Structure formats: structure tokens, C-alpha cells
């Protein structure tokens, strides 16, 4: 049994989109759990909007099926799908006040007594005191909240958001991210949010699908994607990664590799299948997981830590952390972010250092994969 708020997962099976000889979305299988805040994340042109539009019914797929719960909606026109879309351009009616804008969907369906529902929506988006204002009297963030309220009053099973915060300045964007997350938690329906901003996706979403070249490269919770990227694209698109060329010498529950003359350990479950089969790989570690010790003091480094030597090329103090660029003997340029460093204790350019970190924070990627 399904109802308007529990309509089931959004399931895409074999969905693709081609324009002439160009494939914007390669056949894609994706399940978006009911009630989740789900982000489609990727650079411009990766196919995220096309995917969203196929869920909305605004774009016909070249192959595949769109399910909402058990229902195949592939051939339904947009207005017959229990789905609403919020676009970057809010498209509010300028001559109507905020209440009338929000009530529009209900009025169009001939519903007369709308006051209670409009008031509930105004409260949900915290604009109760703006009911009689016209859109131009509201800030960009407030207008965006009206657009969300106008969509939600129709009780869709799924709300699709296409770069809804793209027109806002950075500060307002950050506020609206938290605001949208709060609204989603309160209404409990599925939100599918398209963005190219990795921080936005990480802040808001329960699950993120990272898209690249019309394909989903990796799907997971933000922390999993960050800590355990499976492709070099994901490792570099979400935050900064240090990727060091290495060669496998032992595989098992722990993979041992040689890199830059030393040995590094990588947890087996943080390696791709190709890496576990041996050969060349890229060993990854995030900049904030690395500590720096002057080479003269290397004896004090605890046993069992992964270690690479290098020479400081540059350091900059950016308030919350000190960021170092370190050149390794093998020619790699490594980034290290250290927090709580006293000004006097900062290492100077030219210093010989050892970079060291807990092996648990290391991941192993296939060095031969295509990098777009
Ligand atoms: P953006 O953030 O720039 O909107 P996106 O990841 O959402 O990017 P899409 O809008 O899904 O990307 O477009 C994916 C690819 O398909 C792009 O290369 C785009 O140029 C192409 N494309 C989209 N619509 C059409 C169309 N109607 N005809 C031809 N090519 C199209």
C-alpha cells in the first residue's frame, strides 16, 4: 500500500539518454531510497540535470524504466507524476503575493479552501510574516523558500531540485542548505537535489551519486565517499587527495605496497578489486590525515605508521590550519593540512620531513583507470 508521503523508492533501471550520436547519460541503474535527501553531484555537463529531468518526465529516456515505488511512470507526462520540480530560477508570479503564489497549485486544481494549507506551508518555510509581500520584496533565499513551499503544497512523493541555490551568494547558500535539509526532515518526502558543489552535496545529502561523463562513478553516504573514494575522479572531486604511485608487494586483508622507496600499508577493504589483484596503483591519503615531523626527529614517530619522506616546498597559515606543500623524492607534490600548530613550531620551506599517518586512513585506487 502506498500513500502520498510513503510512495516508495525512486528506481531507475537501464535509464539512458542520447542526443543524436552523443550519449548524455549511459544506461544507469539507481535506487533513491524513499524519504532520503539524495544528491546528484558532478561537474557541468556530466548528465545530472538530464537524469533529474527523466525522473520528472520532462525528458523522454532513450532506454530504461522509471519506477516510483512499484509504479512504472516512464510513459506518464510530468503533470501526472507525483513529483514536483524546483528550478534555479524561482519563476514566482510577480503580480501575486506570497500566499497566492503558494496557493497556485491548489487553486489550479479547483480547490477552494486553501488557507490552512498555505498557512502550514508559510510556517514550514518560516515566512509567516511575509504572506502579503510580493516576490520582489523578498531576498533571493526567501524567494527560493516560496518556490519550495509552492511545490510542497501539492504533496508530491518526490521533490526534485535543480541547482536551486545556484543564484544565491555563498553565505545565503550555506544558510539555505541547512534550511532545505530542515524542511526535508520535517516533511519526510524524498528530495533529489542536483548540484555541482561538493560541499553542498556533502552538507545536505544522506546519499550522493557522483556523476562523471554520463555515468555514476560512486554512490554512497558523504563520509564514505570522502573516506573511501573508489576512483581518482571521486578522490579529487570531493576534497583534496594525495595520490602516490605505488606497486603492490603483498595482498590480503592488508595490502602492502612500495612507494617512494618505502613500504606502505593499505587496508584490503579500502582497495579496489584491481588493486587487490596486484600491480600498479595509486595510494591515497587526505591532507588532514597526515602529520609532519622534522627528519631529525623521525625516531620519535610511533611504530606502524605509514611514512614517506619529503621536503617542504611551501607553507601557508590560513587561520584554522597550516597548509604545507611537500615534494617527495619521487617527484610527487603532496598537500598536508595541520591544525593547532603554534606559529613558532611551523616548519619552514626547505626542511627535510617525514610525512606519516595511520594506515587505516589510506586507500588504494586502480592506476590504470581512465581519468576524465
Ligand atoms: P549543468 O550543470 O551544466 O546543467 P549537467 O551535468 O546537468 O550540467 P546535463 O544538462 O544533463 O548536464 O547535460 C549533459 C550533456 O548533454 C551535456 O553535454 C549537454 O550539452 C548535453 N545536452 C543536454 N541537453 C541536450 C539537448 N537537448 N541536445 C543536445 N545535447 C544536450
Image (cartoon, rainbow, N blue to C red):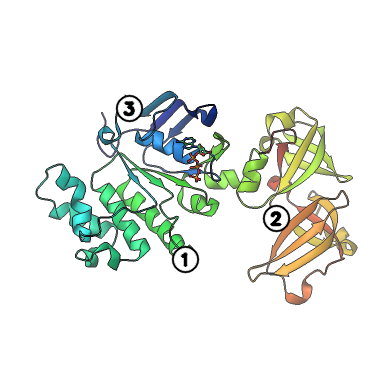
Q: Is mark 2 within 8 Å of ligand 1?
A: no
**Image spot of residue 82 (x, y percent):** 28, 36
SS under mark 3: loop
Image quadrant where residue 229 sits: top right
Q: Within 10 Å of the Cα at label 2, are there few (<14), some (14-19), or many (20+) other Cα atoms? A: many
Foreground: disc 2 or disc 1: 1
Horizontal arrangement in the rendering, residue 113 relative to residue 151 (left or right): left
Label of residue 287 in the image: 2
Residue, x 87% and y 65% (percent of image)?
351
Is there CB contact under 8 Å for labels 3 and 2? no
Taking depth in this image into account, of 68 and 269 the one nearest to the observer is 68
Residue, x 53% and y 30% (percent of image)?
23
Sequence-first disc among 1 and 3: 3
Q: Residue furthest bottom?
A: 344
Task: Determine whether 103 is above or below 282 in the image.
Answer: below
Sequence-first disc among 2 and 1: 1
Horizontal arrangement in the rendering, residue 280 relative to residue 339 (left or right): right
User: Disc 1 designates what residue?
Assistant: 171
Label of residue 73 in the image: 3
Residue, x 77% and y 54% (percent of image)?
334
Sequence-first disc among 3 and 2: 3
Q: Residue furthest front?
A: 20
> Does residue 180 appear in the picture of this structure?
yes
The CA distance from mark 1 to mark 3 is 38 Å
Q: Quadrant of the C terminus?
A: top right
Image quadrant where residue 258 sits: top right
**Image spot of residue 112 (x, y percent):** 9, 48
Q: Quadrant of the N terminus?
A: top left
> Does residue 228 appear in the picture of this structure?
no
Horizontal arrangement in the rendering, residue 62 relative to residue 57 (left or right): right
Taking depth in this image into account, of 75 and 226 the one nearest to the observer is 75
Task: Determine whether 276 is above or below 149 in the image.
Answer: above
Amino acid at each position: 500500500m502506498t500513500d502520498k508521503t510513503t510512495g516508495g523508492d525512486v528506481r531507475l533501471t537501464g535509464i539512458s539518454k542520447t542526443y543524436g550520436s552523443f550519449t548524455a547519460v549511459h544506461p544507469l541503474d539507481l535506487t533513491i531510497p524513499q524519504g532520503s535527501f539524495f544528491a546528484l553531484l558532478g561537474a557541468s555537463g556530466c548528465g545530472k540535470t538530464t537524469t533529474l529531468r527523466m525522473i520528472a518526465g520532462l525528458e523522454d529516456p532513450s532506454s530504461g524504466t522509471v519506477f516510483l515505488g512499484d509504479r512504472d511512470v516512464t510513459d506518464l507526462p510530468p503533470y501526472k507524476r507525483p513529483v514536483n520540480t524546483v528550478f534555479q530560477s524561482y519563476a514566482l508570479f510577480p503580480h501575486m503575493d506570497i500566499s497566492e503564489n503558494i496557493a497556485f497549485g491548489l487553486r489550479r486544481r479547483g480547490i477552494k479552501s486553501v488557507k490552512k494549507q498555505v498557512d502550514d506551508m508559510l510556517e514550514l518555510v518560516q515566512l509567516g510574516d511575509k504572506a502579503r509581500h510580493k516576490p520582489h520584496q523578498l531576498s533571493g533565499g526567501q524567494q527560493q523558500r516560496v518556490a519550495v513551499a509552492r511545490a510542497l503544497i501539492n504533496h508530491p512523493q518526490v521533490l526534485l531540485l535543480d541547482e536551486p541555490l545556484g543564484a544565491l551568494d555563498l553565505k545565503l547558500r550555506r544558510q539555505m542548505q541547512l534550511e532545505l535539509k530542515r524542511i526535508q526532515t520535517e516533511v519526510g518526502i524524498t528530495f533529489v537535489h542536483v548540484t555541482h558543489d561538493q560541499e553542498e552535496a556533502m552538507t545536505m545529502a544522506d546519499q550522493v551519486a557522483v556523476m562523471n561523463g554520463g555515468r555514476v562513478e560512486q554512490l554512497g553516504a558523504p563520509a564514505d565517499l570522502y573516506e573511501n573514494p573508489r576512483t581518482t575522479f571521486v578522490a579529487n572531486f570531493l576534497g583534496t587527495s594525495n595520490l602516490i604511485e605505488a606497486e603492490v608487494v603483498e595482498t590480503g586483508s592488508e595490502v602492502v605496497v612500495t612507494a617512494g622507496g618505502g613500504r606502505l600499508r593499505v587496508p584490503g577493504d579500502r582497495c579496489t578489486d584491481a588493486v587487490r589483484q596486484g600491480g600498479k596503483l595509486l595510494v591515497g591519503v587526505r591532507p588532514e590525515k597526515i602529520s609532519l615531523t622534522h627528519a631529525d626527529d623521525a625516531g620519535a614517530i610511533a611504530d606502524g605508521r605509514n611514512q614517506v619522506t619529503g621536503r617542504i616546498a611551501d607553507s601557508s597559515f590560513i587561520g584554522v590550519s597550516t597548509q604545507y606543500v611537500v615534494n617527495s623524492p619521487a617527484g610527487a607534490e603532496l598537500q598536508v593540512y595541520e591544525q593547532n600548530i603554534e606559529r613558532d613550531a611551523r616548519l619552514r620551506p626547505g626542511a627535510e620531513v617525514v610525512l606519516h599517518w595511520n594506515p587505516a586512513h589510506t586507500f588504494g585506487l586502480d592506476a590504470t583507470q581512465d581519468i576524465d
